[in-house]
Image (spheres, rainbow, N blue to C red):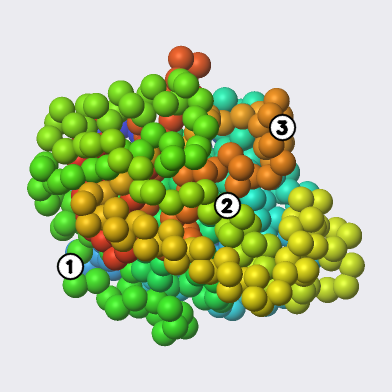
Amino acid sequence: MAHPEPGTDPAAMTAAELAAAYSAGTLSPVEATRAALDAIAARDDVLNAFCLVDPERALMQAKESEARWHNGHAQGLLDGVPISIKDIFLTEGWPTLRGSTSIRPDVPWPIDSPAAARLREDGLVFLGKTTTPELAWKATTDCALTGITRNPVDPAKTSGGSSGGSAVAVAAGMGPVSIGTDGGGSVRIPASFCGVVGFKPTHGRIPLYPASPFGPLAHGGPFARTVEDVALLMDILSLPDPRDPTAGAPPLSTFRGELQREVRGATAGFSATLGFAEVDPEVAAVVAAAVRRLDEAGLRVVEADPGFTDPRAAFEQMWAAGAAAMLSTFPAGTRERVDPGLGAVWDRGRTLSAVEYIDARAVAAEVGIAMGAFHTAHDVLITPTMPITAFEAGHDVPPASSLESWPQWTPFTYPFNLTQQPAISIPAGTTAAGMPVGLQIVGPRHSDDLVLAVARFAELVLA
């Protein structure tokens, strides 16, 4: 294949641009994969986005893709595009340690999760696995097994989490796309902190296996630098898998095709606080300015709170119950080894009764009913993704605060895990210090295509 145009850096190209270049013969998957591996070698010693990198396997896959493109038989939409995979998803041939010292790496790993299987079938190139806090339990990314994952904008700051490694990899040019998980904001939080796009689709839209212990809270979700790339990944990841009994039916249309739908004139309710969140004034100003631009560009924006009270207590009960159920299957002595914060959540979860869990589910239903009513008047909800920007790395909560748990500083994300709605974070701008601020767009359940279309419109307006 021909080489790319002079001055073109494959590591800076989107997945869509790479696929187009492969098709045109101006770039090889091998060149793109080497550029991603070079970026990992150059930056990951500081950023720590990867817990496993497999250059030999990646280059082998890239060469196979190169041959397919050369012969005019691409395997899928993104054949040959480099991708990283959060170390929560089972991936054949690689250990899935989930940030835990209690999981043995030296056993066979013969199974692909649904996400890994769909990506492999499409021909993407697997660079490696990205970091997660222990068992993906919190909204920052650090653990005893892999250390601290740092923000590429300012390595002194946190990446956010729990899919911090994936967000950092995309933001730092270490592959154009990645996939993570989101049980309370774990895709949207690091996307906001690192300045990339992160999408949590409707629950079940991306099939999961094994079933997450966090049950109805758990979603898979893609990261990219553009909404277009997210839509392309959704067309791959949304394909069915019989191992997830909660998965939805196959989509009736393509997400990439729906990106071009007209959203001018659609109604958006803008809630600056959801009625209960405290927001840093500079973050609030960046988001408000972005929303004004969207309104001026033709999205009909009105200020409107959804009308539910903070459901954090219910979320934390469901989260603790899931953690306790998961950890009860681990070997004796695990309690003494786990992250102290996770241990405290485990201890709480073990005290909860089934009735208390059902009570928490009832609160989730109430929030869902409130959002259903909200969406009868507003096509989408817009909020800040985060009330703050990234804080000092190595802390579970902002170190200057009096906060005690990560859900206390993520008030805009976990409510929409309780309701299972699609929600996306896109870059809204930066603070005076240059730290990214995210804008969240939330739609009704099963309106993933609408959320992506509004996000694409917003991305173009705010560019």
Report the residue at 28% width, 36% height from top.
303
Report the residue at 50% width, 16% height from top.
433
Please, what is the three-letter code of the amino acid marked with disc 2? Arg
Label 2–label 3 contact, CB within 8 A: no
Q: Earlier in the sequence, mark 2 or mark 3?
A: 2
Q: Earlier in the sequence, mark 3 or mark 1?
A: 1
> How many marks on residues?
3
Q: Which residue is mark 2?
A: 312
Q: Is residue 214 visible?
A: no
Residue 397: image quadrant is top right
Please, what is the three-letter code of the amino acid marked with disc 1? Ser
**Residue 190: where, in percent of width, then height?**
51, 42
Q: Is residue 201 above or below residue 328?
A: above
Frontmost residue, 392 versus 239: 392
Q: Earlier in the sequence, mark 1 or mark 2?
A: 1
Image-based side of 151 in relation to 5, left or right: right
Q: Is residue 134 visible?
A: yes
**Residue 370: where, in percent of width, then height?**
37, 57
Q: Secondary structure at mark 1?
A: loop
Disc on res. 402: 3
Report the residue at 51% width, 63% height from top.
363
Distance, label 1 to label 2, CA atoms, is: 35 Å
Q: Residue placed farthest to the top in the image?
A: 432
Residue 195: image quadrant is top left
Q: Which residue is mark 1?
A: 253
